[in-house]
Amino acid sequence: MEKQTTDLNLYTDEDVQQAIKELFSHEKFVTGMQGFLPRALSHHI
């Protein structure tokens, strides 16, 4: 657990917030695309 805390300290709050925004926008994109793609392809995204 201590290692994870130390690793998080390497990043600024701005970096973390930006990464979270990008992750959520990507998650929304993937969720939306899965509705259009066959099940077999969805795990490649």
Image: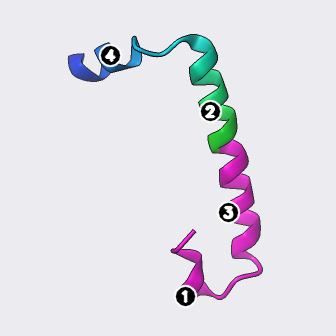
Q: Left or right of 22: which side holds 12?
A: left
Task: Look at mark 3 in the image and give the residue it sits on.
Answer: 30
Q: Which residues are magenta?
A: 24-45
Q: Quadrant of the N terminus?
A: top left
Q: State the separation of the CA atoms marked 1 and 2.
A: 28 Å
Residue labelled with disc 1: 40
Please tell me how crowded label 1 is: few (under 14), some (14-19), or many (20+) other residues with Cα within 10 Å. Answer: few
Pointer 3 with pointer 2, Cβ within 8 A = no
Residue 13 in the image, given as x and y percentages of width and height: 58, 12
Q: Amino acid at mark 2?
A: Ile
As drawn, 8 above or below 25: above
Q: Which residue was labeled with disc 4?
A: 5
What crowding class fits label 2: few (fewer than 14 Cα within 10 Å), some (14-19), or many (20 or more)? few
For disc 2, the marked residue is: 20
The residue depicted at 59 percent of the width and 77 percent of the height is: 42
Q: Callout 4: few (<14), some (14-19), or many (20+) C-alpha neighbours within 10 Å?
A: few
Please name the residue shown 32% across and 16% down the image. Answer: 5
**Magenta stretch: residue 43 in it?**
yes
Percent position (x, y) of residue 34? 69, 74
Residue occupying image coordinates x 73% and y 46%: 25
- Give the mark nearer the N terminus: 4 vs 1: 4
Residue 30 forms part of the magenta stretch: yes
